[in-house]
Image (tube, rainbow, N blue to C red):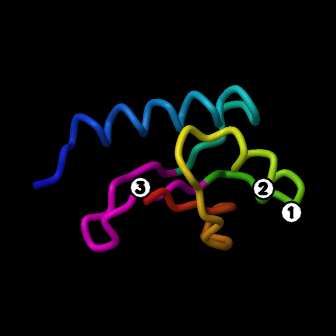
Amino acid sequence: MTDYDSIWRTQDEIRTVVNAVLGECIWNLTWSDRRMAIELELTVTLDDDAIDNLCCQFPIAADYDGEGSKGTKFTFY
């Protein structure tokens, strides 16, 4: 059974980190049942140093997931 309350809290923590580090640049932040993960896409494209810096700030491990249609993507398992 999926614990949506925990997912929503984690999404709030992710949103807080992104807003603090980069400003408001979230394009999409959703739960994927297929991947059993939270997916984040930004409206900006980050370089390698910015990706590493942002990943270090998240409360849970973040995986760089490439470039999406709008910007850099991350996945949280």
Judged from the image, the secondary structure of the residue bearing numbered disc 1 is helix
| Residue behind mark 3 | 38
The C terminus: image quadrant: bottom left
Asked if the residue at tag 3 contacts the one at tag 2, i.e. Cβ–Cβ closer than 8 Å, the answer is: no
Q: Callout 1, which amino acid? A: Asp
| Residue behind mark 2 | 51
Magenta residues (range):
28-41
Q: Nearer the viewer, residue 34 or 44?
A: 34
Q: Which residue is found at the position 58% from the left and 44% from the top?
A: 26
The earlier-in-sequence mark between 1 and 3 is 3
Image: 46 above or below 5 = below
The earlier-in-sequence mark between 2 and 3 is 3
Q: Which residue is found at the position 69% from the left and 50% from the top?
A: 55
Cα distance in 3D space between marks 1 and 3: 21 Å
Q: Which quadrant of the figure has residue 71?
A: bottom right
Q: Position of residue 35 (x, y in %)?
A: 34, 71
Judged from the image, the secondary structure of the residue bearing numbered disc 3 is strand
Q: Callout 3, which amino acid? A: Ile
| Residue behind mark 1 | 48
Asked if the residue at tag 2 contacts the one at tag 1, i.e. Cβ–Cβ closer than 8 Å, the answer is: yes
Q: Position of residue 40 (x, y in %)?
A: 52, 54
